[in-house]
Image: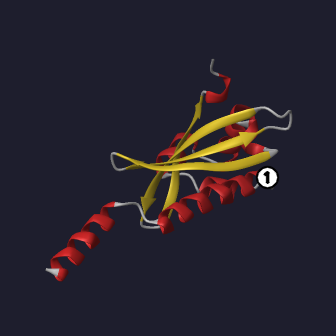
């Protein structure tokens, strides 16, 4: 009976995302943010999924997109990691950024795991819930 209970517990725990995965996902995002802060677009590009790399083709194009479209990610005044979520087999990490003017932005990073480790498969800007009525 004890073995059955232990086997059931192990199988249930196997369905939950591991804390190690959460830490690894955050490390990848933090490493990409750090690469942007040094204008090391090649290193930042390495953290992008093959889909993103195919879309932008070169680290320079990728860097230009981030500089113009996501300046708060390129040069954040502050970064805070939020919820880590496994939704229907997809991993999402929420990250709050503050820009140099003090404005807050909430982003949703979609992550994928490859043989080479975790990669960023997209970033979506979300409405800031703190502005609601």
Residue 91 relative to residue 33: left or right:
left
118 or 17: nearer the eye? 17
Q: In this rendering, does residue 128 appear at all?
A: no
Q: Residue at image x 63%, y 45%?
A: 95
Mark 1, residue position:
37
Packing grade of label 1 (10 A; few <14, some 14-19, many >=20) is some
Instruction: Determine whether the residue tagged by mark 1 lies in a helix, strand or loop.
Output: helix
Q: How many badges with numbers are in the image?
A: 1
Q: Residue at image x 72%, y 43%?
A: 73
Q: Residue at image x 25%, y 68%?
A: 11
Q: Residue at image x 60%, y 39%?
A: 107
Q: Position of residue 86 (x, y in %)?
A: 41, 50
Asked which colour scheme the image uses, the reply is: secondary structure
Q: In this rendering, does residue 64 appear at all?
A: yes
Quadrant (top left/top right/bottom left/bottom right) for the N terminus: bottom left
Which image quadrant is residue 38 in?
Answer: bottom right
1 or 63: nearer the eye? 1
Residue situated furthest front in the rendering: 1
15 or 89: nearer the eye? 15
Q: Position of residue 77 (x, y in %)?
A: 82, 45
Residue 93 relative to residue 90: left or right:
right
Quadrant (top left/top right/bottom left/bottom right) for the C terminus: top right
Q: Position of residue 101 (x, y in %)?
A: 86, 33
Residue 19 vertical position relative to residue 47 in the rendered view, above or below: below
């Amino acid at each position: 009976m004890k073995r059955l209970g232990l086997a059931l517990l192990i199988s249930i725990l196997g369905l939950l995302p591991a804390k190690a995965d959460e830490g690894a996902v955050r490390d990848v995002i933090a490493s990409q943010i750090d690469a942007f802060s040094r204008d090391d677009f090649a290193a930042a590009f390495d953290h992008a999924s093959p889909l993103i790399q195919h879309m932008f083709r070169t680290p320079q194009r990728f860097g230009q997109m981030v500089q113009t479209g996501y300046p708060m990610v390129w040069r954040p005044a502050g970064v805070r990691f939020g919820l880590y979520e496994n939704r229907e087999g997809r991993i999402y990490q929420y990250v709050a950024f503050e820009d140099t003017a003090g404005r807050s932005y909430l982003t949703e990073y979609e992550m994928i795991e490859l043989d080479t480790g975790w990669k960023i498969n997209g970033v979506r800007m979300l409405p800031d819930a703190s502005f609601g009525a």
